[in-house]
Image (cartoon, rainbow, N blue to C red):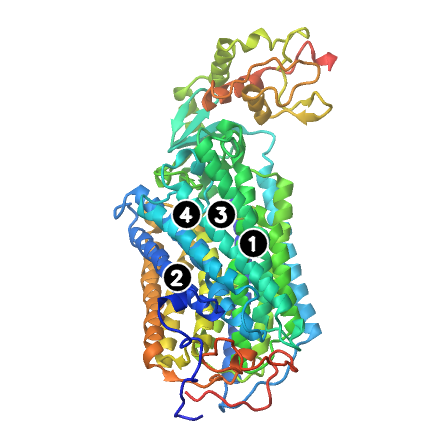
């Protein structure tokens, strides 16, 4: 992404330089060429010119439309992560970044990623708004309490890079920084193996799922009191009232903390709200567990 | 030009002496001077905070003040400069003084309301100053929730209350201008004979009246959530923090145009007067002010491209932001074209006008970087955006204000200032400004986030340049204070029209009488209707 952003950046630097020099050059030229030579002199009586007005309306319009489309296309690519991504979860709090890997590894203010993979980070905040910013990757997104936001990037060079909080968040905002460590794939595999076990985050989510007794209602059987969660993420859900939505991580989270908001069609709003009862990290573990539940669901044919 | 000039026997400055003749005045010119004193005071308070910010940032370590103090410094710098200086400065000082004179009226439509506006402004500003003296404010001038409602332990409510109150001053001033421009024009002063200064203030007033109530409500909601735990913005209470940003920017983006549109009006006057030529494309420039005022209400979402709004919302706000750039570009081209075959003088106000056009052009063009949503993601919340809006607000608004102040100073005071000192300080300000803010564009592109008390050492060189520029800029701003104050007593007297400019304000005495004109003028000419020869300024 960085080369695409930079290409537009330097195009705009060129546009800015051109027009700034054009205007400055004309002003200086006119100021000298037409300087007042006698105290009582006046300028030529020129009221305006339609052709010129049209010209300098249309040319900026066309240039800005080029920039608009260019910027929009980059933004589309930024907003749509590729299908295959390495998923990492992040929680911002005053004043640190907490990262959770799928193997259960946790890092604070440091993030290890492999070279060449598409990395997607799903983020939320425990308190106020933060913003995860990695200048080298040209990515940035606010980290908002009560919401999930995401960024993705593909590291192309091993090394360590700055990671900043870019949304002012209080006393130690300027210390809410860290580094992204981009590793060769083989080194990354070693790091993964020593830092956790595959599937540990989903397993932690399953433990929490059972501890909170979610499993008493959310079962595979079609007669259960809650809808089955198998294959939920990415599936179209019919809601009470006739709306539909495509379930994503944010919907899973919302359905835990405030389940009566959007009820799956055919179910009663009987689930208690878990707002404030599960930490954001616990919620992310639950989300990962729900995502890890397979597609094959005995109730899927009933949909 | 006669050398034995005398002040007119009767003028607004000698129409009563003593404190009450000022504090209870209903004369728009005296009220303008009350504002001049007040906004200058708050400018130097806000400026003192900026000096401390730049001193802290001269080294990468956060070593001069604590992090909490630093956070309060940039917050209070922003609050003071935006709400108590930049928004009122040109309308309340120059607009107040000049609009009635320019349209041939005796005063604004509601003189008592005008005085009330000043008192409301002072009460609000005092509240906020109280908040600063008794502990400060650390939310940033943007008051983002839930930080401001749930996390900050500083004086959020008194500061917000002060801004809330001052908002009414803004609304009432806007209302006063709108009614005055509609109803008080002299015979023959048709809409299309109005000076462009008046047009731009008309557009500004519309924004003040329509936008400010939204800010007022938003700040009330912040106070209510903080005090009573209403769940409006805090997700813990069931609120939505992004809702705050929508409401806040719905006012605060148009507020940028409250700051810059009057400046554009000033520059139109300056370019015409110092080229002795009609402004090229008068009606295009007039309507572009209205275009900016209207489109300005539709672009607030470009402050939230990384805040998690939908991709399509972002694209629409991006498109509209590019469109609002076009009327500004048109103005720049028209001012430049006005200089073509002009009788261009290099007196101080023109230097400021030229400075404005150059810096506003850079400020506007860097706005295109920010409107391009894919590029905005990288540079938003960095020093790039700091540089961008300082080019607009400092390079634009303050340059225009100083240019206007120098241009109309002989009218305001009846005297002239030291031209050489004025030129030198204009040059210092221009150079100091660029040295302060240009490096910040590069810092932002390299990734230095804004509102950082300490920063990685590789950013130091550019920060030192910026701090060096800020010290020059500080000197540049102090000089006019000194020589303008000096000129009040020792400045050379001037006649009614020292610049050889046209416009009703130059047909009355300097300083004008309280009722502005001995008899109501009848206008039979177009704006900027220069004769073939004028009596020039012999300095």
Q: Earlier in the sequence, mark 2 or mark 4?
A: 2
Residue designated by label 2:
B38
Q: Nearer the viewer, mark 3 or mark 2?
A: 2
Q: CA distance from mark 3 to mark 4?
A: 9 Å
Q: Nearer the viewer, mark 1 or mark 3?
A: 1
In this rendering, do the residues under marks 1 and 3 share a single chain?
yes
Q: CA distance from mark 1 to mark 3?
A: 19 Å
Helix, strand or loop for disc 1: helix
Residue designated by label 1:
B254
Tell me whether the residue at label 3 lies in contact with that at label 2, contact meaning CB atoms closer than 8 angstroms: no
Residue B425 appears in which quarter of the rendering?
A: bottom left
Q: Which mark is residue B299?
A: none
Horizontally, residue B70 falls left or right of residue A137, namely left
Work out whether A77 lies above or below B341.
Answer: above
Image coordinates for residue B209, horizontal then vertical, percent:
58, 55
Helix, strand or loop for disc 3: loop
Q: CA distance from mark 4 to mark 1?
A: 22 Å
Residue designated by label 4:
B450
In this rendering, do the residues under marks 1 and 2 share a single chain?
yes
Give the crowd class for mark 4: few <14, some 14-19, many >=20 residues within 10 Å: many
Give the crowd class for mark 1: few <14, some 14-19, many >=20 residues within 10 Å: many
Q: Residue at x 42, y 22 (%)?
A: A105
Q: Earlier in the sequence, mark 4 or mark 1?
A: 1
- Residue placed furthest toward the left: B64
Q: Earlier in the sequence, mark 3 or mark 4?
A: 3
């Amino acid at each position: 992404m960085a080369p695409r952003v930079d290409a537009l950046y330097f195009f705009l630097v060129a546009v800015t330089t051109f027009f700034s020099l054009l205007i400055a050059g004309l002003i200086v030229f006119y100021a000298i060429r037409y300087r007042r030579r006698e105290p009582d002199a006046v300028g030529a009586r020129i009221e305006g010119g339609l052709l010129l007005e049209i010209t300098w309306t249309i040319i900026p319009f066309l240039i800005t439309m080029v920039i608009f489309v260019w910027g929009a296309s980059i933004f589309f690519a930024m907003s749509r992560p590729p299908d295959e991504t390495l998923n990492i979860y992040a929680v911002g709090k005053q004043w640190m970044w907490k990262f959770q890997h799928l193997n259960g590894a946790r890092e604070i203010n440091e993030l290890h990623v492999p070279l060449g993979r598409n990395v997607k980070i799903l983020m939320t905040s425990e308190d106020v708004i933060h913003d995860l910013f990695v200048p080298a990757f040209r990515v940035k997104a606010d980290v908002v309490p009560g919401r999930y936001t995401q960024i993705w990037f593909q590291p192309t060079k091993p090394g360590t890079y700055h990671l900043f909080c870019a949304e002012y968040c209080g006393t130690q905002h300027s210390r809410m920084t860290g580094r992204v460590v981009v590793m060769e794939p083989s080194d990354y595999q070693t790091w993964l193996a020593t830092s956790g076990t595959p599937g540990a985050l989903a397993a932690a989510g399953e433990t929490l799922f059972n501890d909170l007794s979610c499993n008493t209602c959310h079962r595979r059987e079609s007669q259960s009191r809650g809808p089955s969660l198998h294959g939920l993420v990415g599936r179209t859900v019919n809601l009470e009232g006739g709306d539909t939505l495509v379930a994503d991580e944010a919907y899973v989270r919302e359905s835990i903390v405030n389940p009566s908001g959007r009820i799956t069609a055919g179910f009663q709003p009987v689930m208690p709200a878990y707002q404030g009862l599960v930490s954001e990290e616990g919620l992310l573990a639950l989300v990962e567990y729900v995502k890890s539940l397979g597609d094959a669901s005995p109730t899927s044919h009933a949909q | 030009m006669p050398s034995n000039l005398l002040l007119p026997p009767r003028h607004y400055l000698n129409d009563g002496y003593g404190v009450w003749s000022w504090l209870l005045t209903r004369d728009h010119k005296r009220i303008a001077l009350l504002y001049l004193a007040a906004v200058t005071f708050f400018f130097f308070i806000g400026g003192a905070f900026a000096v401390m910010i730049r001193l802290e940032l001269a080294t990468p370590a956060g070593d001069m003040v604590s992090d909490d103090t630093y956070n309060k410094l940039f917050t209070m710098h922003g609050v003071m400069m935006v709400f108590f200086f930049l928004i009122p400065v040109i309308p309340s000082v120059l607009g107040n003084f000049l609009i009635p004179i320019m349209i041939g009226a005796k005063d604004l439509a509601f003189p008592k309301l005008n005085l009330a506006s000043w008192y409301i402004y002072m009460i609000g500003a005092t509240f906020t100053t109280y908040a600063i003296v008794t502990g400060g404010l650390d939310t940033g001038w943007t008051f983002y929730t839930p930080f401001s409602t749930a996390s900050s332990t500083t004086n959020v409510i008194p500061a917000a209350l002060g801004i809330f109150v001052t908002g009414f001053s803004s609304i009432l001033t806007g209302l006063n201008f709108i009614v005055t421009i509609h109803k008080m024009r002299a015979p023959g002063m048709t809409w299309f004979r109005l000076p462009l200064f008046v047009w731009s203030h008309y557009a500004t007033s519309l924004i003040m009246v329509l936008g400010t109530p939204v800010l007022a409500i938003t700040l009330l909601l912040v106070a209510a959530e903080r005090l009573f735990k209403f769940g409006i913005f805090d997700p813990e209470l069931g609120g939505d923090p992004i809702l705050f940003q929508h409401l806040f920017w719905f006012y605060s983006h148009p507020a940028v145009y409250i700051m810059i549109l009057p400046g554009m009006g000033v520059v139109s006057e300056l370019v015409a007067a110092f080229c002795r030529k009609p402004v090229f494309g008068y009606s295009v420039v007039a309507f572009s002010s209205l275009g900016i005022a209207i489109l300005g209400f539709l672009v607030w979402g470009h402050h939230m491209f990384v805040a998690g709004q939908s991709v399509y919302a972002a694209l629409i706000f991006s498109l509209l932001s590019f469109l609002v750039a076009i009327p500004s570009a048109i103005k720049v081209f028209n001012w430049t074209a006005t200089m073509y075959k002009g009788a261009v003088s290099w007196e101080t106000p023109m230097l400021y006008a030229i400075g404005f056009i150059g810096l506003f052009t850079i400020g506007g063009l860097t706005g295109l970087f920010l409107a391009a949503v894919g590029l905005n993601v990288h540079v938003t919340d960095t020093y790039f955006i700091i540089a961008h809006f300082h080019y607009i607000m400092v390079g634009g608004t303050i340059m225009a204000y100083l240019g206007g102040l120098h241009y109309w100073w002989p009218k305001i005071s009846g005297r002239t200032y030291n031209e050489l000192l004025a030129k030198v300080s204009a040059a210092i300000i221009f150079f100091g400004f660029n040295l302060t803010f240009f490096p910040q564009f590069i810092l932002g592109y390299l990734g230095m986030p804004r509102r950082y008390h300490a920063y990685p050492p590789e950013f130091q060189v550019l920060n030192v340049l910026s701090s060096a520029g800020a010290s020059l800029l500080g000197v540049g701003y102090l000089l006019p204070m000194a020589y303008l104050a000096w000129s009040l007593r020792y400045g050379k007297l001037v006649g009614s029209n020292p610049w050889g400019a046209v416009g009703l304000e130059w047909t009355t005495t300097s300083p004008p009488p309280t009722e502005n004109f001995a008899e109501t003028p009848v206008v039979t000419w177009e704006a900027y209707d220069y004769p073939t020869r004028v009596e020039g300024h012999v300095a």
